[in-house]
Amino acid sequence: MRGVVYPIGALCVACTAGPMPTRPAPASTPPPLPMVQTVEEPQLAPRAAETSTAAPSPPRLEAQALEELELDGFLPAVVAPPIGAVGPQPVWVAAHGAGGKASIHCTQWRSMLPEGRGFVVCPRGFPTHPQAGVDAPGFYYVGHPRLGEEVAAALKALSARWPTWVDLEAPVFAGYSQGASMGALALPGHPGRFARILLWEGGNGEHDEWNLRVARRLGEHGTRKVLFACGRLVCRENADTSARYLQREGLEAEVVYVSGAGHTYVGDLRAAVKARLSWLLEGDPRWR
């Protein structure tokens, strides 16, 4: 049988040719992008004001240079307040001499004490001209028990008048002449418990105000320091003896003496007393 002869060229073409190319598919359309949404920024609420945790400033004392203080059973006392003070203030009680005036002694002590420190309280006493009342030219104290009661009434009224500022702990008593003599008799055992006492030309022992028993009683009621001020030799000699009584009972006591100054609360004796106030008030930071 005759075989079938295939052309060699045709076979070669068939062997080397690859598959017939196909027509490229049309490019697909990309999907549409989503529409961008506009998002409004949220409005923040205003920040609340920060609350201060600091304590409010304490009030400052507003007062006149001299104030009258009504007392139960007595004429009004005179007070020189620590104007502008902030916080509790100590108390300085000043008793004048026979024929003196509370306003004069309050003014003097206000000028001598540390600025802006302490209430100066001056019991008025009884008028030398009774019908004149508070307008009398001078005043005196009718006895040491009565002076002690008037001082107690003044301390009570002072605390009620200025409760935010008055500190009745460990007050100071300063007496001149009759105020000193009667103060020396009234203070041992007094409810005011005066920690420091200044006896100026009075209360120095000339009338036997002091002995060891009285000195002990004074210390038991809180007194720590006593300053005597003298402008006469006899005052100084008696004050030296009285100071030793006090010292033997554990109190601190000093004597300020200005020779020739006399019975006065002005001049060189005043300057000498002022110079020793730092010793008298030492240990009480409220007076700084």
Image: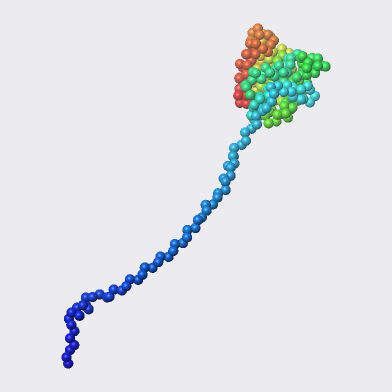
Residue 168 in the image, given as x and y percentages of width and height? 69, 27
Q: Quadrant of residue 106?
A: top right
Q: Residue at x 25, y 75 (%)?
A: 18
User: In percent of the image, x 62 and y 35: which residue is there?
Assistant: 56
Kindly identify the residue that appears in the image at 38 percent across and 68 percent down.
Answer: 28
Determine the image quadrant of residue 53: top right
**Quarter of the image where one finds residue 143:** top right
Relative to residue 28, is residue 111 drawn left or right?
Answer: right
Residue 189 pos. (x, y %): 72, 24
Colour mode of the rendering: rainbow
Residue found at x 69% / y 11%: 264
Image quadrant containing the N terminus: bottom left
Q: Is residue 229 visible?
A: yes
When the figure is inspected, residue 11 is found, relative to residue 219, above or below; the finding is below
Q: Residue furthest bottom?
A: 1
Q: x, y (%) of residue 150? A: 76, 22
Q: Is residue 37 left or right of residue 23?
A: right
